[in-house]
Amino acid sequence: MKEMWQTIKEYFGDGYVPGSAPFRYNVHCCEMKRPAKKSDNIRRGMYLDEEAMPLFTAMGDAYAPPCTCQDMQALIRHIDEFVETFPGSHPDDYAITSDKGDTDIDQVSLYTMRDSICWWVQWGGAHHPSHYWKEMYVGFATLPDDVQVPPRDFMDGTFRYLGYTWDECREGLLAEGISPEHVKFAEMCLCRQAICQYLEKVDPGLRPLLMSKTLLMTQYRVFTANTLGCGSFLLHTEGIPFLGLEDDVLEVAAVSHCLSLDTAKEAIGVLKGEKTETVAGDRAQLKRELRWVYLRCLEYLDKKPTAHLLRFASAGLLYVPMMDRYHERVRGNIRFPITEAMARILAPFVKGQATPNGGSEKGHLSEKVVSEQTNGSVSLVF
Ligand SMILES: [Zn+2]
């Protein structure tokens, strides 16, 4: 993990806080100002006016957070020390962390693929074979939340997601016409995510450094969600050129995406207890601060040519009430069954079931999880 940490440090570099690599941020949210004139931009996918927010009990007013951004330096130093002494493995490696009673990693993987396709279509991405590997990338980016996979295993192919190694996904992305520079960016984002997800599970010293610091917690939380890498592929489907590490619009959209997600999760009561729970502490005050950052991010995006990213930036408000992933939490952390119709959509994402171009090579997972019925339909076996 030490080498991986060093690699992403060199790749991402510092942001506006000196010594913040690899937790680079270009835009300093604390300095954002409310624009003098209100926008009438109709391209917004979802926007709640600041004046109207108090009408929603789930929301309320907004309040500027204190700037905690310089604390990033201490956070980086803490992680530097942790990776220096980390023995390379942990007793809970490969534990399932979904908290939904899952007992099988392949089964958890299938559920994360369900969730990933749900997100992809809610963001405005088309569910189409030409986006197979981009949707698969979202799946890779979801799994570390639900299983404690050692970052090295995750990236070097020791771990297989639905039968695929990360290398296979990377090759697939290149074959889908994503530029090598863009795929490299996505790979580094995934690597950073794998490390951040792992650290929040194995390093008890991390959370106290983030607690009650709205900006810092949000910034770390954006890395565990990897909305940056996933959002970059959404832009590609829109034909928008890849701008790399300098893309401030993508960055701000990635931040506000997580804020909309946390706001919606809090509204339905499933945010409490999460490891990077953005409002842990003085909830009422921290929620005000979250809303302030969210509003300033939306206003920032609204002025940009790629303002249609606003849909991605507010997507949490739309998809949380719609997705099984969150309803399973509301119902007491259970699993909904995979229906036959769902299985038909998911089966092509299991290696060996059906490749994107219609092949049907057999993979190790296929016989275990998915069985083909004689009538040609596909169902999942648990
Ligand atoms: Zn700040």
Image (spheres, helix red, strand yellow):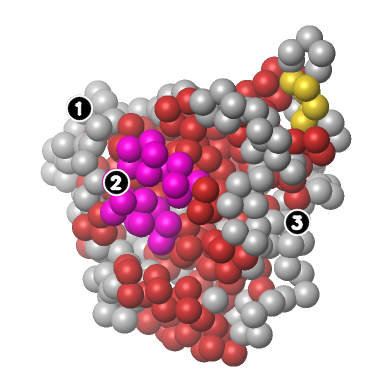
* Of callouts 2 and 3, the N-terminal one: 3
Where residue 224 appears, as percent x and y from the top left, is: 51, 59
SS for dot 3: loop
Residue in the image at 70% along x and 17% along y: 341
Q: How many marks?
A: 3
Labelled disc at residue 179: 2
Q: Quadrant of the C terminus?
A: top right
Establish if 264 lies above or below 150: above
Magenta stretch: includes residue 377: no
Seen in the image, is 203 located left or right of residue 228? right
Distance from the alpha carbon under mark 2 to that under mark 3: 34 Å
The kind of residue tagged 1 is Asp
Per the rendered image, the range of residues in magenta is 169-189
Report, in whole angstroms, how far the alpha carbon at label 1 lies from the one at label 3: 46 Å
Whether pointer 2 and pointer 1 mark residues with C-beta atoms closer than 8 Å, the reply is no
Q: Amino acid at mark 3?
A: Ile
The residue tagged 3 is 96
Q: Give the answer, above or below, for where 6 lies relative to 200.
A: below
